[in-house]
Amino acid sequence: MNSDMVDLTISAAPHVRDKIKTPHLMRDVIIALLPATIGGLVIFGLRHTLGVIVVSVVSAVAAEYIGNVLFRRKNSIKDLSASVTGLLLALILPPTSPYWMVVVGAFSAILLGKAIFGSVGSNPFNPALVGRAVLMVSWTTFMTTWVKPFYWSGMGAMSTATMATVTGIDAVTTATPLSIIKFQGLQPLLQMFGSRSQLYLALFLGNRPGCIGETSVLLLLIGGVYLILRKVIDWKIPLCFIGSVFILSFIFGRDPIFSILSGGLFLGAFFMATDYSSSPLTSRGKLLYGIFLGFITVIIRQFGPYPEGVMFSILLGNMVVPYFDKLRPHVYGVFKRKGEA
Amino acid sequence: MKVFTYSPGGTHLEEEKWTKDKVFVSLQPPSVAVIPLVQHTGAPNTPLVKIGDNVKIGSILGSSPAPISAPVHASISGQVIAIEDRLCPTGAKVQSVVIKNDFKDEWVNCEGVASLEEISPEEIVKKIRDCGIVGLGGAAFPTSVKLSPPVGKVIDTVIANGAECEPYLTTDYRVMLEYSDQVINGLLIELKVLKAKKGVIAVEDNKVDAAELLLNAIREKNLENLIEVVLVKTKYPQGGEKQLIKAILGREVPSEGLPLDVGVVVQNVGTLKAISEAIFEGKPLIDRGITISGTVIKNPGNYIVRIGTPVSEIIEQVGGLNRRLRKLIFGGPMTGVAQSSIEVPVVKGTSGILFFGEEAFTMAPEEETPCIRCSRCVDHCPTGLMPVLIDHAYRRNDLKLSESLNAVDCIECGVCSYVCPAKRHLTDNIKKAKQAILKQRRIEAAKKAAFEKLRAKKEQEKAQKEVGK
């Protein structure tokens, strides 16, 4: 036989692999975030919001590159994980965030939240939330300044003060539904939106003050369901998280429907708590992790100084992931006999 | 028919069963056959022939008195031209008998029985051993050993494994279609030997036609009360012995135990055919059905090939290669072994030979990217292991942690590596961790035995001294 027809290479089994690779998963997350991103642009206006998103993504990718150089790692920009972090960070910032602050947030997210721990997959915390937490404690005013939806179209009639002096944006500030309910009660909120059902509808569609990508439950749900159907994320964490917020809010005498629709719960549950590297590996771990996050969120909302608890509950949950990972699946053929621990 | 399956874990693979409709074709006996003296799991055989000896088809070339072993036979007639170490499909060099074909195709005298009434269970087991029958699914465990459970172990069910869950392979499927009588007879023989009450033929539900054919044959023979045909879901690794037992009977083979611990014997359908031929025709295991497939081989199909036929002869006989051959796999793509030479021979455990060109490197990229902790390996492991953690432990050389993560229970099915989006070599590392743990256990057991021996000796000396007083 002609010898150049044969040039054998050996390798370990399996000799066939699934076509899905890391960048495919990251790309799916970006696709899933697009409805909420576009929704944010529509609700809060292209003018400044688009800038926040672009600055956040570009800074996150730049920070990833710097991290690679700093820690002498292979170029990891192509795996798209930094882009995902940048986009997620933008979506959990107020629409009026100054660009310089976005840059600081993105660099904190990538360098403090990820690069110092190792390559992608080694970060114990959700990087975007680390970035947001840094901004939250450093520039609390900017991080708690909210504008009304469609303020750019002149629809924000109930203005309180102009933001022009702080952000350079000609906008009016207001409060989020969660902070109104926390500090003023339900009544002003109902006055603002008309009736309870109108309040629910506004929250579901996203017609309310809040972070760029957190307001529209509908658009987040579309993205979340897409990720579940594509098997990028598991249903367990989001369902248990949202479910336990619903039940615990009810137990604490809060309006359960309002509780799950407001704040950053859907964004947090579908896109933050499911971050691979900072969430549990096993099925049972995921179930309990979701419940734990819901519990902490409600506790913070009920007793904490902040109106919203999703960010801190996830960061706290990230810390205890190693314990949830101990809830291992049943190993075939391994039975604990009596007297054995 | 109800469709059984195991859970959790596993994955659906692209089936790629291109050779499904290709009827078995017998290849010509090779001009030179290379017959390794070890083709089974167990003790090696010692050669019984010398260079220059003339052998016939079925002549015993080597055997061993050890209980876990199976003799090997000449698959062609001719002259022994060498007895030397040759490369085997396992990747090891094994002492092999090389026979030059005289093309007379002479057989030794083979005799079978006409009916099962004529032969006792003990005689059946002996005949199966003498005919060199081993498991043809891949593991090549001597069948006579499987049929001799230790005293006290009761076998109630024999499962005929026709799941054939590996992509590309269609050997078992063709055996079920073309040799259904032999498969059923083989199962009856096993039921008789093991005194088992029930035989179950398990077929994946992508091969419903084979299941129906077997069912009709069973009905014609009035064996419905004894043998059942069940469908199992097409899901990899449904054909894994442990998964099949869980799917059909709901039993779990204990860790590091055997199916007989839960009263079950699982036998590949091809093996049952070989058993039937051994008992009724007296035919030793000198050939077997093999799927020849892949992208670069001309005329993929199912072929009956003599044991000892080198791959190079097979390539020539089926019509050659389309393109340059870059990867040659013995077995299926999930658990098969990549070969370094086309001179390796077909052995008893060879269920398929796959030929791939450059695309082999896109099918299974070698380069690893960082683990992103996506938990796919955990979700898909059919054993319930945490492959990612065992992999981390192995890379850190932490054998103790690997052991506490039950690395030894890994069935090496390859699913974790398959689903990994970072293309990490999880299966390979877990396999290595498992081997390292088992090696360490052997060393420790040997140390303990040596220590016990020393202590016994000391105590004996002490006792003697006291007697001396």
Image: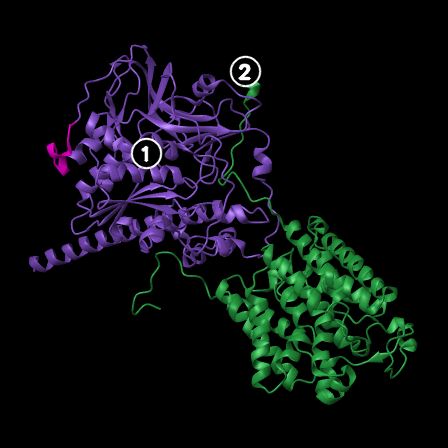
Chain colours: A green, B purple
- Mark in front: 1 vs 2: 1
Residue A10 drawn at (x, y percent): 51, 33
In front: A341, or B384?
B384
Q: Which mark is residue A210?
A: none
In front: A243, or B224?
B224
Mark 2: amino acid: Asn
Q: Is residue B12 magenta?
A: no
Q: Is residue A161 above or below residue B211?
A: below
- Mark 1 — residue? B270
Residue under the point 49% across and 46% down = B12
Choose top left, top right, bottom left or bottom right for residue A255: bottom right
Residues in magenta, as a range: B113-123
Residue under the point 68% across and 58% down = A32
Residue A267 drawn at (x, y percent): 68, 68
Choose top left, top right, bottom left or bottom right for residue A152: bottom right
Residue A327 horizontal side relative to residue B196, left or right: right
Residue B160 visible? The answer is yes
Q: Is residue B118 magenta?
A: yes
As helix, strand or loop, the secondary structure at mark 1 comes to helix
Residue B139 visible? The answer is no
Mark 1: amino acid: Gly
Residue A137 horizontal side relative to residue B81, left or right: right
- Mark 2 — residue? A2
Question: Could you tell me which chain the residue with mark 2 belongs to?
Answer: A
Residue B356 horizontal side relative to residue B345, left or right: right
Q: CA distance from mark 1 to mark 2?
A: 35 Å
Question: Could you tell me which chain the residue with mark 1 belongs to?
Answer: B
As helix, strand or loop, the secondary structure at mark 2 comes to loop
